[in-house]
Image: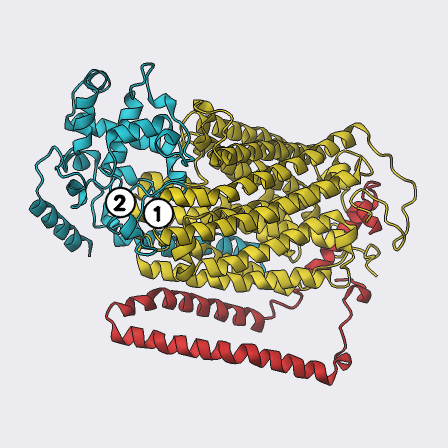
């Protein structure tokens, strides 16, 4: 029986694969099954980061051309989706991870250790954990640097960081050198990463456009902890 | 001692079909040429990326030449262009000869050949125009996935038919092939669809880990080892040391290998007890690997001179040494202690280069060295010395690249842990990336020797020498490199 | 299976093994096995302590039990197969394969592998 072809086909081929799929794939899925995946609307409803509003103030003419509705939740949703798609298409995730591990002093360098609940949203489908860090991790990038820094960096990274090995992305800019729709969307996406965390507003001393307070954030984190356990 | 031709075959349909009836030689050659074309493109893509890493990118700011996109061409080109094509070619050679039956349909084989090249071209164009899917090594655009999957199913049907029809106890190669055909289809379907459409978030990380791992472990590894179990005995004219042990290796691989997926995301938000499970079964795989290695070196016993005289055997066994190296490395790097430092660093890049090219790439180049003159109807290579250049440039390039990246990875990992500024880690990596560029160039030049040799062999076919020199004398022959 | 006896590899005779060689093997084996065994026992004790002490520690048993149960199942299957004589000619296919290859190559003038 062990030498028959159907055994090899069924036990080794199908059986062991399904076993591995159950143990390594379905088990983690079942553990998180009760948590609802957040839609784009859910994400936007948590508040629009200050940086998105600032983009509109900094480049009023270009912004209104690319996002005619102004810095509203619907524009922000569009920007997040487009920014995420560019992040995937350009292969950003091959050189930048999106997870903080509890080891190697990563929490000191970037901030709070990643929590599973942070990944239960449409923009992490498939998840963008990453496997290599040529550049730094980005999941705590929100408000760490200014919009201007990111825009200059995308145009030519070595202008901002001389040792950078990141490529130039001139196709994120229009003929006049202003960020185009892609550029603004990607900056909005990067500046959103980690903006859901309580420590976010204190990086720069002012909160996001939505009403958020330190007390509210701490309560939010507490709820997240309770849900996550 | 090894002439086995005299025994009549029992319990067969008596007459052995002629080899030219069984094997579609032209298709084997076409697949090999396609594989070499794609490996060249993939290597140029890798070179482009390594130029970016030392800040002298030749095409800065050109959208279609964005290094980020060409990186995906590099990995996908190697996996689906080089390895898949070369394996398809070798399967078209090995399966009919092992089963004494033709593939299900010759027309289907030709169709698969053209369809697969179409899939590859669509993938390259899709990646370069910005339609990647966020699954590492499965970046193939979503609209290409169904076609590729259909192709894989057709491949499975085409080859499974002769295997399942063949009578008598099966040789270990066919065990590997049967399960590999099933696995490849399922792995590809899982990686392309589950994380994108069914499971999101942290759990999709587990699936992606499983996919990255199974693509190497359940598609490349079983077909690669299956081909080794075929080519090594027929070239050495000596049976494998222990067929029983090889079956132990098969069942061990089949059982433990798929259970490793999550080890690619240790310390991630995936539940810790699952990570422990992946670590345990990874270490179990290393024991299995050891049995396979013992088996092959047992086969080489008393025939060690073949390493000096026979180039394909040298490719194969260098690949096996590298295989054992990567697996040993894997047993350590999968532990949580190592993961703290080496995860996200160039160590992993060195590891994956050694596995995909240093092991499977070398095996492929080895059986190509063995088969191509025969496929070209030439009695030998145009210049065996060019093949020696090919071997040494590629082998040394790979070896230096591996050590270079492993050391770079350790330096990066410890600097990150010591909270060095990010820019400082880039400065520290720069010399290693420069060395890596030169090793890459050495490997590309090595392939150029091979391509030139194939071309010249096709043009100047060597005629068949009437009487082969008896064994023991100086070995004449295409696969032979005189020292 | 019709097969010539000389296809079989010659078994190396144990007589050639000298007394020193045996001693060296024993010493090396002990040098490896004793520390490894101690390490294993130590880890086993640690494992049981973790499982007993911590309510979450019991969680660690799950994957290990999974693997053990499945492995035990495989072993039973194997024993059953051996008992029913399913491995009588395990080594056969490797000779058949070489014989077939030789026959296929017989009419092929390009099969230089014949010479080696």
> Is B234 drawn above or below residue C84 in the view shown?
above
Q: Give the CA distance from mark 2 to mark 1.
A: 10 Å
User: Residue at 8% of width from left, 42% of height from top?
Assistant: A213
Q: Is residue A148 left or right of residue B165?
A: left
- Along the line of sight, which residue is nearer the eye, A5 or A60? A60
Q: For numbered disc 2, what is the local secondary structure?
A: helix
Q: Are marks 2 and 1 in contact (CB under 8 Å)?
A: yes
* Snapshot quadrant of residue B394: top right
Q: Is residue B281 above or below residue B18?
A: below
Q: Which chain is cyan?
A: A
Q: Would you name the residue on which mark 2 appears?
A: A119
Residues at marks 2 and 1 on the same chain: no
Q: Position of residue C115 (x, y in %)?
A: 84, 50
In this rendered view, identify the residue nearer to me: B41 or B170: B41
Give the structural element (helix, strand or loop) at label 1.
Answer: helix
| Depth order, front residue of B440/A89 | B440
What x and y, as percent, mark residue B433? Answer: 51, 41
- Asked if B344 appears above or below C88 in the picture, the reply is above
| Residue at screen point 11% across, 46% down | A217
On residue B205, which mark appears? Answer: 1
Count residues near mark 1 (Cα–Cα under 10 Å), then give few for <14, some for 14-19, many for 20+.
many
Residue shown at 81% from the left, 39% from the top: B380
Q: Position of residue A183 (x, y in %)?
A: 30, 25
């Amino acid at each position: 029986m062990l030498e028959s072809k159907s055994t090899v086909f069924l036990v080794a081929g199908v059986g062991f694969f399904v076993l591995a799929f159950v143990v390594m794939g379905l088990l983690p899925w079942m553990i998180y099954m009760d948590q609802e995946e957040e839609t784009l609307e859910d994400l936007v409803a948590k508040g629009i980061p200050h940086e998105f509003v600032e983009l509109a103030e900094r480049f009023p003419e270009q912004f209104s051309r690319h996002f005619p509705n102004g810095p509203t939740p619907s524009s922000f949703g569009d920007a997040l989706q487009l920014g995420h798609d560019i992040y995937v298409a350009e292969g950003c995730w091959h050189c930048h991870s999106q997870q903080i591990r509890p080891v190697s002093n990563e929490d000191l360098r970037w901030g709070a250790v990643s929590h599973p609940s942070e990944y239960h949203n449409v923009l992490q489908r498939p998840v963008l954990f990453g496997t290599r860090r040529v550049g730094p991790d980005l999941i705590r990038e929100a408000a760490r640097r200014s919009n201007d820094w990111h825009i200059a960096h995308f145009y030519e990274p070595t202008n901002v960081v001389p040792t950078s090995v990141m490529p130039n992305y001139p196709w994120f800019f229009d003929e006049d050198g202003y960020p185009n729709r892609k550029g603004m969307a990607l900056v909005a996406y990067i500046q959103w990463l980690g903006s859901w965390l309580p420590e976010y507003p204190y990086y720069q001393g002012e909160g996001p456009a939505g009403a958020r307070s330190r007390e509210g954030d701490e309560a939010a984190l507490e709820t997240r902890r309770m849900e996550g356990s | 001692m090894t002439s086995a031709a005299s025994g009549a075959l029992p319990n067969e349909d008596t007459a052995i079909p002629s080899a030219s009836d069984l094997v579609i030689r032209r298709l084997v050659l076409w697949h090999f040429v396609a594989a070499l074309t794609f490996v060249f493109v993939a290597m140029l893509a890798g070179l482009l990326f390594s130029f970016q890493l030392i800040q002298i990118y030749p095409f800065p700011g050109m959208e279609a030449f964005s290094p980020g996109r060409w990186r995906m061409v590099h990995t996908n080109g190697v996996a689906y262009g080089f390895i898949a094509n070369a394996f398809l070619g070798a399967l078209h050679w090995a399966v009919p000869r092992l089963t004494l039956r033709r593939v299900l349909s010759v027309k289907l084989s030709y169709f698969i050949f053209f369809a697969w090249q179409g899939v590859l071209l669509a993938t390259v164009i899709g990646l370069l125009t910005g339609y990647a899917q966020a699954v590492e090594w499965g970046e193939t655009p979503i609209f290409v996935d169904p076609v590729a999957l259909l192709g894989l199913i057709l491949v499975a049907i085409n080859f499974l038919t002769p295997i399942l029809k063949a009578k008598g106890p099966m040789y270990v190669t066919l065990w590997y092939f049967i399960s590999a055909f099933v696995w490849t289809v399922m792995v590809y379907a899982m990686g392309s669809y589950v994380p994108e459409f069914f499971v999101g978030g942290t759990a999709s990380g587990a699936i992606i880990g499983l996919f990255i791992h199974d693509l190497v472990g359940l598609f490349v590894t079983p077909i690669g080892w299956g081909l080794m179990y075929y080519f090594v005995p027929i070239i050495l004219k000596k049976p494998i040391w222990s067929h029983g042990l090889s079956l132990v290796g098969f069942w061990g691989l089949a059982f433990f290998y798929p259970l490793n997926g999550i080890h690619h995301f240790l310390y991630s938000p995936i539940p810790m007890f699952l990570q422990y499970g992946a670590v345990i079964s990874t270490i179990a795989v290393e024991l299995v690997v050891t049995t396979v290695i013992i088996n092959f070196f047992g086969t080489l016993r008393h025939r060690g001179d073949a390493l000096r005289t026979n180039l394909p055997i040298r490719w194969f066994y260098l690949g096996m040494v590298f295989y054992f190296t990567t697996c040993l490395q894997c047993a350590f790097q999968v532990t949580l202690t190592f993961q703290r430092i080496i995860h996200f660093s160039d160590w992993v890049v060195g590891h994956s280069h050694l596995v995909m090219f240093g092991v499977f790439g070398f095996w492929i180049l080895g059986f190509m060295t063995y088969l191509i003159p025969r496929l070209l109807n030439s009695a030998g290579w145009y210049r065996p010395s060019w093949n020696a250049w090919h071997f040494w440039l590629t082998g040394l390039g790979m070896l230096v690249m591996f050590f270079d990246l492993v050391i770079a990875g350790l330096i990066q990992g410890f600097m990150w842990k010591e909270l060095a500024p990010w820019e400082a880690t880039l400065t520290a990596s720069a010399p290693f990336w420069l060395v890596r560029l030169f090793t890459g160039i050495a490997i590309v030049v090595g392939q150029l020797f091979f391509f030139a040799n194939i071309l010249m062999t096709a043009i100047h076919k060597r005629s068949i020498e009437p009487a082969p020199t008896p064994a023991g004398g100086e070995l004449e022959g295409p696969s032979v490199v005189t020292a | 299976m019709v097969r010539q006896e000389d296809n079989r590899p010659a078994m190396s005779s144990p007589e050639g093994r000298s007394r020193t060689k045996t001693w060296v093997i024993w010493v090396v084996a002990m040098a490896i096995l004793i520390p490894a065994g101690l390490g294993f026992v130590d880890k086993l004790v640690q494992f049981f302590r973790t499982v007993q002490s911590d309510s979450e520690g019991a969680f660690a048993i799950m994957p290990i039990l999974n693997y053990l149960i499945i492995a035990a199942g495989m072993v039973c299957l194997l024993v059953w197969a051996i008992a029913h004589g399913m491995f009588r000619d395990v080594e056969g296919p490797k000779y058949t394969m070489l014989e077939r290859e030789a026959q296929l190559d017989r009419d092929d003038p390009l099969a230089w592998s014949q010479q080696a």
